[in-house]
Amino acid sequence: MAFRAATQRALNMRHMMNVTRQPITLSSVRPQSTLNTGEVVEDPQIGDYPNLPHFSTQTRGPYGWDDPQDKRNFGETVHEEDELYGVWAPDLHHYSPVKAASQLALFATVFATFATIVYKFYPERPVVQRTYPYNGLSEEFGEREGDIRRRAVSFFFFFFFFSVYN
């Protein structure tokens, strides 16, 4: 639809240029509807439905309602945008960015402290680290002179895969 309107507008401009033989700028073409009464209409599509204030029903108290789940009384007018202001709408959070950042920093500090305590007091392994002769069996795993990356890692996965799945 927008393409059709743009095409019509371009054809009309070309026609006007051919008829008048003068270049037409976009600022010289005036829109058709410029009538403005100055009346401010809050919501023209609401009709005669009451224009209720915009506040969430989550701010209401939990007691004293005919329908405690939705926090409203029988016969109470439902807001036009009830899906935005009802109880089932997204939650309201009254946290400033400073408070949210401080809570995030507090969580990170507690987590890092716990990780540090676990790291410091983690017991040592009660066994001796395994050692292999001939530079960790590098020649047996296929390492060659001048290799940039050790081949033992890739061969380890190869042997691990076949030892587990065979």
Image: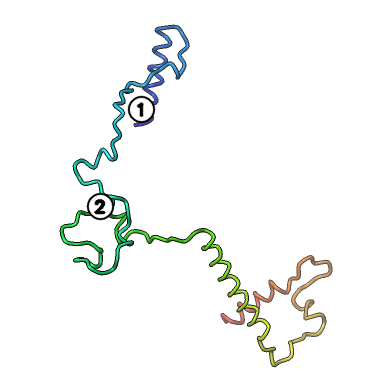
- Residues at discs 1 and 2 in contact (Cβ within 8 Å): no
Task: Choose the circle earlier in sequence order: 1 or 2.
Answer: 1
Q: Which residue is mark 1?
A: 4
Rendered residue at 42%/9% (across/down): 18
Rendered residue at 29%/26% (across/down): 37
Q: Which quarter of the image is occupied by the C terminus?
A: bottom right
Counting from the top left corner in percent of width and height, residue 5 is at: 36, 26
Counting from the top left corner in percent of width and height, residue 91 is at: 38, 61
**Mark number, residue 79:** 2
Query: Is residue 46 left or right of 30 when viewed as pictured?
Result: left
Q: Identify the image quadrant of residue 101.
A: bottom right
Counting from the top left corner in percent of width and height, residue 82 is at: 27, 54
Q: CA distance from mark 1 to mark 2?
A: 39 Å
Counting from the top left corner in percent of width and height, residue 25 is at: 47, 16
Query: Is residue 24 left or right of 73 when viewed as pictured?
Result: right
**Amino acid type of the residue that numbered disc 2 sits on in the rendered structure:** His
Rendered residue at 19%/62% (across/down): 73
* SS assignment at label 2: loop
> Looking at the picture, does residue 50 appear above or below residue 94?
above
**Amino acid type of the residue that numbered disc 1 sits on in the rendered structure:** Arg
* Mark 1 surroundings: few (<14), some (14-19) or many (≥20) residues within 10 A: few
